[in-house]
Image: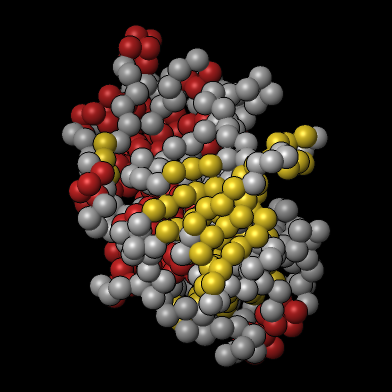
Amino acid sequence: MSTSFSQYLDIPRRESDYQPVLLRLSHFFEFVTHHDPGEYVEQAKRCMNCGIPFCHNYGCPLGNPVPEANALIAEGRWKEACDLFHAYNNFPEWTGRLCPAPCEASCVHEIHGDAVCIRQLELELVERGWKEGWITPYVSPIKTGRKVAIVGSGPAGLAAAQQLARAGHDVVVYEKAEKPGGILRYGIPDFKLEKPILDRRLSQLVEEGVLFQCGIEIGSDMSTHYLQKRYDAIVLTGGAMRPRDLKIPGRELNGIIYAMDYLVASNQAVSALSESRLNARGQRVVIIGGGDTGADCLGTAIRQKARDVVQIEILPKPPLTRSTTNPWPQWPNVLRTGTSHKEGGSRQWNTATKRFVGENGQVNALECVKVDWKQGKPVELPNSQFRIDADMVLLAMGFVHPIHDSLLKNLGVGLDSRGNVRTDSDTMMCDKPGIFAAGDMQSGASLVVRAIAGGRRAARGVDLYLMGETDLT
């Protein structure tokens, strides 16, 4: 590597720039502004090429070769870096936009300074790859004659599909929605991932031989028995779609909506250039849940011209810096202020909702109480009751497990203690031979980077099962 000692000491971290808030709130498009290529070369030079690179050895579920790729970028060898990243990650443009970057949290720079801009460099690298024509379909020169069905077209399913098609298998992806993409299309707002970005990668998969069958729900529109007879292997990647509910008095009132239902309605409206059926315009919106899904709801509601938006969280406000019990290279449990939080609304911590209040069947307020945390449990503070007015309440408290419908029951796959599909950790095969699972359906709700990694691991297990050996990584 050509980087000198002074370069990684003296070059400051420079993150992405964004459109001004007022401008980006006028549309649903992505709002990252890109630097001159020379800026990214400088940022790549900040990488120290550590002897033990925690960024991909500890931080990245995909094992992305971060130091090697950064060294290539620093030397202006962009195409080689692009090829290297794709050897480990089928979809760097998605992780470059959506991943919270555990690689950066475990960067050695993070111990006493600012981590290398790994995610930003990955995004610029893959976008340049598309622009320059470096990213092209790979059509397997062999055909095994084996048929594989993928159920679900989110990041795990698509990763498995691409890997298996490249291994020479005939791959069909079944998706119950109108178009493929799963949560990438219907759950992620366009201001974080514009759908043409998804569609161009789907086109690559089609050219590589992957067949998509949409509008088909396995177990309902097509029997699992038919699927098992027709295919040599099945990969379940349907996601963890059972949302966590809040069963308190008043839950039956209108206007209390699961966050994913709200985001799906918004994404469908954006794609159709129409108004969402669940629109926050002029509404007083309360979001229950302080995670990424809640932040996506916040950014969406603000763009829909909500009157007011409050995001509440039962957990305490995280610290600004790592605590002594949360050392590097662990994931830092610190306060995260995303782009949506900088656009408007307010946040409240240590807040529990006791009751929904309404009139004529419509919610109009939440009765809340402040809590303190003792021995890992919330304890209500006396005389701390208060009320938040609301016309729309969005439940964004995460997901508990996949939906236990006829698909899983008819296939007879086992579940773990959390209600997720149980698999062998190495091959990703379920209790039933020839049936595999990956992504949130297998791991529980997690990160896009873990879903892609799980899909790749399942593809390797399928290839090994079908052929007795595998070259898939």
Seen at 45% across and 58% down, the residue is 285
Residue 200, position as x, y percentages in the image: 31, 64
Seen at 52% across and 33% down, the residue is 335
Residue found at the very far top of the displayed protein: 6
Front residue (pair 407, 187)? 187
Q: Is residue 244 left or right of residue 363?
A: right
Residue 266, position as x, y percentages in the image: 38, 68
* Quadrant where the N terminus is found in the figure: top left
Q: Is residue 242 left or right of residue 86?
A: right
Front residue (pair 282, 99)? 282
Front residue (pair 148, 310)? 310
Front residue (pair 230, 378)? 378
Seen at 38% across and 31% down, the residue is 117
Rendering quarter of residue 91: bottom left
Rendering quarter of residue 121: top left
Residue 323, position as x, y percentages in the image: 63, 22
Residue 451, position as x, y percentages in the image: 56, 55
